[in-house]
Amino acid sequence: MKRIEISEEQIVGGIQLVKPVGKLDVFTFIDLKKYFEELCARMPQGLKVVVDLSGVEYIASSGWSVLLSRRQAIQRQAGDLSVFGMNDNLRRVYDSMKIDRMLPSAAGQEDAVRLLKVVQP
Amino acid sequence: MMGYVFMRFGADFRPENVDRLREKVGECLQRAAIQGSTAFLLLNLMDELICNILEHGSATWVELEVHPREKDVTIILRDDGKAFDVGSSIHAEHASPDMLDPDGRHMGLYMVGHIADTWAYKRLPNDVNELDLVVDLTKKDEGVRP
């Protein structure tokens, strides 16, 4: 099994649901970065993404960095990104890092969709 | 003060070795009676620092000491890599776009700065780096088991 597997599907409202499964660490963050670069190339404007982190057991700073920087890039193109499904351990790290304003998170998918903002380009 | 735990690792920056290191650090925290999400938080802290040493410091070994007390835990990391005052590079301010660099290194130091409450770096006479960190467990949700 690969260290990280990334799948996607389109849900209601044209929102992309992205689900990485595995470890998002110093060896795999580049896979997620490349995935998002390809996704943004396919859908350059108004991309709306919710990332399901329920299958992720570990996120190192490099993984958080990809999620934060991709949200910034997507927002610049009038889109948005939020995350959901963190387990208690990941939530503890997320809370300690105080990045909630830069990377909004929800417990479930529906709430994560509601967190997506309509951003003017 | 409770007993402390000491571990020494050979430096090898490959995924399987880093996974093994994470397991050992987890065992180290368990032996120090630190559990749950507090253990996970400290594991993140040590993982960031150890990976930083292995990836950028050209170290051949890393030593880890964990000193748990009732209200805080002191973590001491030593290595024989290049001199790098990581302590002065740790960010404890707000996250900013300039730390979202491609390798996430600055984000790692930002993470360390938000988990650790104090940090101090020394270059020891025998070309060894020593970083001492203290994490105040009273500010976190769970403490160490007495």
Image (cartoon, coloured by chain):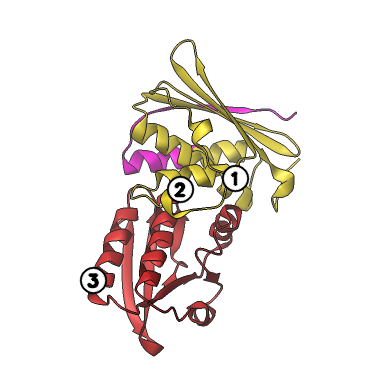
Chain colours: A red, B yellow
Which numbered disc flags the more N-terminal residue, 2 or 1?
2
Specify the subunit that label 3 lies on: A
Residue A41: mark = 3
The span picked out in magenta is: B1-24
Residues under labels 3 and 1: Cα distance?
36 Å
Left or right placement of residue A76 versus residue B64 in this view: left
Quadrant of the snapshot with the C terminus of chain B: top right
Badge 1: residue crowd in 10 Å (few <14, some 14–19, many ≥20): many
Q: Which element type, helix, strand or loop, lies under badge 1?
A: helix
State whether discs 3 and 1 lie on one chain: no
State whether discs 2 and 1 lie on one chain: yes
Specify the subunit that label 1 lies on: B
The front one of B93 and B21 is B93
Amino acid residing under circle 2: Met
Relative to residue A81, is residue B28 depicted above or below?
A: above
Count of residue discs: 3
**Residue sitting at x 56%, y 36%:** B28
The reply to whether residue A1 is in sight is no
Quadrant of the snapshot with the N terminus of chain B: top right
Residue B115: mark = 1
**Residue sitting at x 37%, y 64%:** A70
Amino acid residing under circle 1: Ile
The front one of A102 and B64 is A102
Q: Nearer the viewer, mark 3 or mark 1?
A: 3
Residue A44 spot, x, y in % from top left: 27, 75
Residue B60 spot, x, y in % from top left: 36, 23
Residue B92: mark = none
Q: Which residue is mark 2?
A: B107
